[in-house]
Image (cartoon, rainbow, N blue to C red):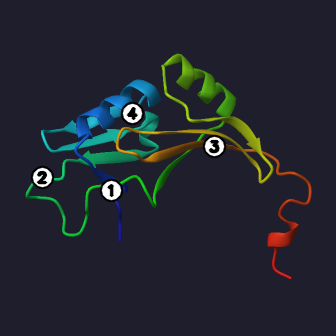
């Protein structure tokens, strides 16, 4: 299979709010917008995400309205501290503060208007011995 793109579609009645949120706070660009579907790209098309209203007849079979559980969006960055400062300057409502985790991530996070958890992470050195108990015997 050759893919042209890969992206989740979040089914939500807050499609317009989500598109505005990603553009304003995270610098995504709207690639396609209609009354029922919006596709956004991150800088350099390194990530894509789409939002769709629940009431359009072209909706694929199966997706229910997203309820905010069981999924998160991971945005890996080179410098989480700089990303955090930029996000705060843009007025992003950050829920989880910038934190160095013992498992080897510097991260912060927030919810988008659909209830999707967005985790912004930088890979850093883990605490010495942290992963020892998780390795196969």
Between marks 4 and 3, how big is the CA–CA gap?
17 Å
Comparing labels 4 and 1, the label whose residue is closer to the camera: 4
- The local crowd at label 1, few if under 14, some if 14 to 19, many if 20 or more residues have their Cα within 10 Å, is few
- Which residue ends up furthest to the left in the rendered image? 57
Dividing the image into 4 quarters, which one contains the N terminus?
A: bottom left
Sooner in the amino-acid sequence: mark 4 or mark 1: 1
Disc 3 marks which residue? Answer: 121
Sooner in the amino-acid sequence: mark 3 or mark 1: 1
- Residue 22 circle label: 4
Q: Secondary structure at mark 1?
A: loop
Q: Does the rendering let one see residue 33?
A: yes
Disc 1 marks which residue? Answer: 4
Q: Residue at x 26, y 56 (%)?
A: 65
Q: What percent of the width, then of the height, locates residue 82? A: 65, 25
Disc 2 marks which residue? Answer: 55
Sooner in the amino-acid sequence: mark 4 or mark 2: 4
């Amino acid at each position: 299979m050759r893919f042209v793109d890969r992206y989740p579609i979040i089914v939500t009645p807050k499609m317009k709010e989500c598109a505005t949120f990603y553009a304003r706070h995270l610098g995504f660009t709207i690639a396609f917008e209609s009354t029922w579907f919006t596709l956004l790209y991150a800088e350099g098309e390194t990530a894509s995400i789409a939002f769709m209203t629940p009431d359009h007849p072209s909706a694929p079979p199966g997706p229910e309205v997203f309820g905010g559980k069981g999924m998160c969006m991971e945005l890996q960055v080179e410098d989480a501290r700089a990303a955090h400062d930029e996000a705060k300057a843009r007025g992003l409502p950050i829920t989880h503060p910038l934190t160095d985790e013992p498992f080897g991530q510097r991260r912060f996070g927030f919810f988008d208007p659909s209830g999707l958890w967005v985790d912004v992470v930088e890979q850093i050195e883990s605490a010495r011995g942290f992963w020892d108990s998780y390795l196969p015997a």
